[in-house]
Image (cartoon, grey):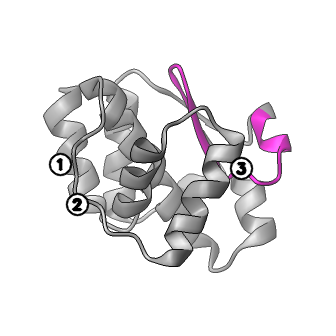
Amino acid sequence: MEFLLYLTPLGKEIINSVMLANYNVRENAPICRNKEIVGYIKSKDFVICTNNIKNTVSPVSYHVNETVYHEATHVAQYCKGSKLNVVTYLDKNKEGNVARSLKVSNSSSSYESEAYYLEDKPKEVLHYLKKFCF
């Protein structure tokens, strides 16, 4: 899986935790044919759309890690069985991202808001994974 080459040490630890939580980590799955999707969680599939990231945003390594942190937040939410109750403060750009995500997913805005808030906070994401999945 190519995306693993882009991960920070913390990103690798998060992926290991996701796999330990019995998620099937996949890259460029059929859902990625929708070019707007860079990551996706469905049942026990954890999908990173590396090709979509490489073709739309830069720097690639930053956005691969951000996507891993975002999707791992959803894993923690699913392990908990509800949102994490993180107080989120999103700038206008991230609020727009939430709106775009809601168009292509069945998620609620509170779940997406938490994931967008935590996508640049990998230590917190790892904390929530450990707290709720193990």
Q: Secondary structure at mark 1?
A: helix
> What amino acid is labelled 2 in the image?
Lys
- The residue located at (60%, 39%) in the rendering is 40
Say which residue appears at 22% left-offset and 52% top-offset: 86
Q: Is residue 36 magenta?
A: yes
**Mark 3 or mark 1: whose residue is earlier in sequence:** 3
For residue 123, above or below residue 26 = below
Counting every numbered tag in the picture gives: 3
Instruction: Work out whether 44 lies above or below 32.
Output: above
Magenta stretch in the rendered image: 31-46
Report if residue 5 is visible in the image: no
Depth check, front residue: 123 or 61: 123
| Residue 65 locus on image (x, y percent) | 48, 62
Give the answer, above or below, for where 59 lies relative to 29: below
Q: Nearer the viewer, residue 118 or 126?
A: 118
Q: Secondary structure at mark 2?
A: helix
User: In the image, residue 29 lies at what x, y percent?
Assistant: 74, 35
Circle 1 residue: 127
**Residue 105 horizontal side relative to residue 19, left or right:** right
Q: Which residue is mark 3?
A: 37
Image quarter in which the N terminus is found: top right
Q: Which mark is residue 123?
A: 2
Q: Where is residue 123 shown, x and y percent of the image? A: 22, 60
Q: Is residue 115 visible?
A: yes
Residue at 53% from the left image edge and 56% from the top image edge? 67
Element under disc 3: loop
Q: Can you give x and y, in whole percent of width and height, for residue 5 in the image?
A: 55, 60
Residue 92: in magenta span: no
**Mark in the foreground, 3 or 2:** 3
Label 2 Cα neighbours within 10 Å, binned few <14 / some 14-19 / many ≥20: some
